[in-house]
Amino acid sequence: MPELPEVETIKTAISKGIGKSQIIDVIINNGRLREQVPNDLPKRIKGTTIIGYKRIAKYIIMELSNGLDLIWHMGMSGKIKLTDYMPDKLDKHDHIIIVTDGGIIIYNDPRRFGLLVYCKKDNLNKCRWFNKTGIDPFDNNLSNDYLYEQLQRHAKLPIKLALLNQEIIAGIGNIYASEILYESRILPTRISKDVSLSECETLIKNIRNILQKAILAGGSTLRDYKKPDGSMGYFQQQHCVYNKTGQRCPDCKCDIAKTGGIKRSVMGGRSTFYCESLQK
């Protein structure tokens, strides 16, 4: 699933490629996504102008001139393709096409776990996708005190699962949680109440540093994700522990024959990677 850096990359690409364009046509080839695309969506947005773009957590928001916001989530395997002309033949799983006077947006989603809905701009923060959303990692309100208080409230939750809790911090996914905890030298299994205030400061610093580096690298391509121009992200080349079971981590000088290198375990149904020698 695209995480914050991938979604930010996609949003920026659409913003630069399509910009503030007028929507000329909307074609729904298959609206059976995670939720059915509203039947009246083409009618509601056709003829409007895109006046802005933003990201909330792992969602892209396209602000329209008629007071509506388009809410777009990529799901597990969703991809955005940008083109100047309608292709002669669409690819399999090209479910939604938005034609603008600045270019064409094609949404491709083999697993159909994505989402495309609309909401009144004034109700955006109250709608059910965002009414429980936590603080964005780059929001100044994400403070050491805030994180410490939240971890105390979720005292028995392993810190890895706390980072994945979108009601605490919005946008961190499985890949980046492992990398953040490695950089912070904190074991993913450590329960939240045992994370100190000073460690919260370290966590916030590494959350922002790693996510920003990943954004600059265009995200991580492991399986399905591609940028809208069809190229891959390359932050996976900078991963220290994710998907590196049995390898030596970059900062470790241990005897890998004895330690077995980077470990993998399953937490909350997701693979977690860590170094037992450096993370405590």
Image (spheres, rainbow, N blue to C red):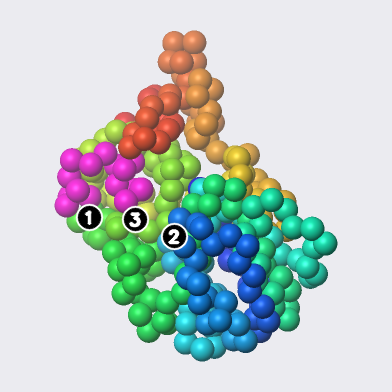
Q: Which mark is on residue 35?
A: 2
The kind of secondary structure the magenta stretch mainly shows is helix
Q: Which mark is residue 166?
A: 3
Query: Which one is closest to the eye, mark 1 or mark 3?
Result: 3
The question of residue 119 being in magenta is answered with: no
Image: 66 above or below 9: below
Vertical comparison of 256 with 226: above or below: above
Q: Secondary structure at mark 2?
A: loop
Could you say which is closer to the camera, residue 161 or residue 261? 161
57 relative position to 227: left or right: left
Q: Which residue is mark 1?
A: 150
Is disc 1 placed on a helix, strand or loop? helix
Which of marks 2 and 1 precedes in the sequence?
Answer: 2
Q: Quick one: which residue is furthest to the bottom in this view?
A: 66
Residue flagged by tag 3: what amino acid is it?
Gln
**Relative to 141, is 219 on the left or the right?**
right
Q: Of callouts 1 and 3, which one flags the residue occurring earlier in the amino acid sequence?
A: 1
Judged by depth in the image, the label closer to the viewer, 3 or 2, is: 2
Q: Residue at x 54, y 47 (%)?
A: 111
Find out whether residue 163 is within the magenta segment. yes
Q: Evaluate if marks 3 and 2 touch, with contact meaning CB atoms under 8 Å apart.
A: no
Q: Nearer the viewer, mark 1 or mark 2?
A: 2
